[in-house]
Image (spheres, grey):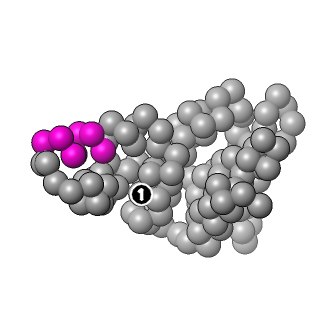
């Protein structure tokens, strides 16, 4: 298993295990998958403050990370950016909290089960990315 794949699966497990807002988890996902948004946030922080890189990273993580763990909109936006064209479904279930499924070209690729639809979709997205790592 590649380190990237293992990291993505570990993030998915943290998403599914928790509930409510988790700023540290949001920040870990943003730093890992934020792409150009992460780079812009880091530049916005680092240039004006002139602070050491580790301080700039901590500030960017704490101030600019989307609320992935509580916002379905943020989870949907992440899915659209990292897996463009993929479809999704999410909803509540009896006893399990919420479930989400994502598909590519109509074929189910990944599921997530968590305390909320946002977390379930986020976990499914992370698992799908891990699966893609396995095939590349």
Report if residue 123 is visible in the image.
no
The answer to if 44 sits in the magenta stretch is yes
Decide if residue 68 is on the left or right side of residue 49: right
User: Residue visible at 71% across and 32% down?
Assistant: 86
Decide if residue 41 is on the left or right side of residue 97: left
| Location of residue 47 (image quadrant) | top left
12 is higher (above) or lower (below) than 73: below
Q: Nearer the viewer, residue 44 or 88?
A: 44
Q: Nearer the viewer, residue 90 or 10?
A: 10
Please identify the dominant SS of the magenta region.
helix
Quarter of the image containing the N terminus? bottom right
Residue 51 at x, y percent in the picture: 16, 54
Residue 17 at x, y percent in the picture: 61, 72
132 is higher (above) or lower (below) than 22: above
- Residue that mark 1 sits on: 27
| Residue segment shown in magenta | 42-48
> In the image as oriented, which residue stretches furthest toward the right?
107
């Amino acid at each position: 298993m590649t380190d990237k794949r293992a990291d993505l699966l570990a993030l998915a497990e943290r998403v599914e295990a928790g509930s409510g807002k988790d700023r540290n988890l949001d920040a870990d996902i943003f730093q890992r998958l934020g792409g150009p948004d992460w780079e812009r946030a880091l530049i916005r922080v680092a240039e004006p403050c002139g602070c050491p890189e580790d301080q700039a990273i901590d500030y960017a993580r704490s101030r600019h990370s989307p609320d992935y763990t509580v916002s379905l909109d943020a989870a949907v936006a992440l899915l659209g950016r990292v897996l463009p064209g993929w479809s999704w479904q999410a909803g509540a279930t009896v006893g399990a909290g919420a479930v989400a499924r994502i598909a590519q070209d109509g074929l189910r690729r990944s599921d997530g089960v968590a305390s909320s639809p946002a977390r379930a979709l986020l976990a499914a997205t992370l698992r799908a990315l891990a699966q893609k790592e396995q095939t590349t």
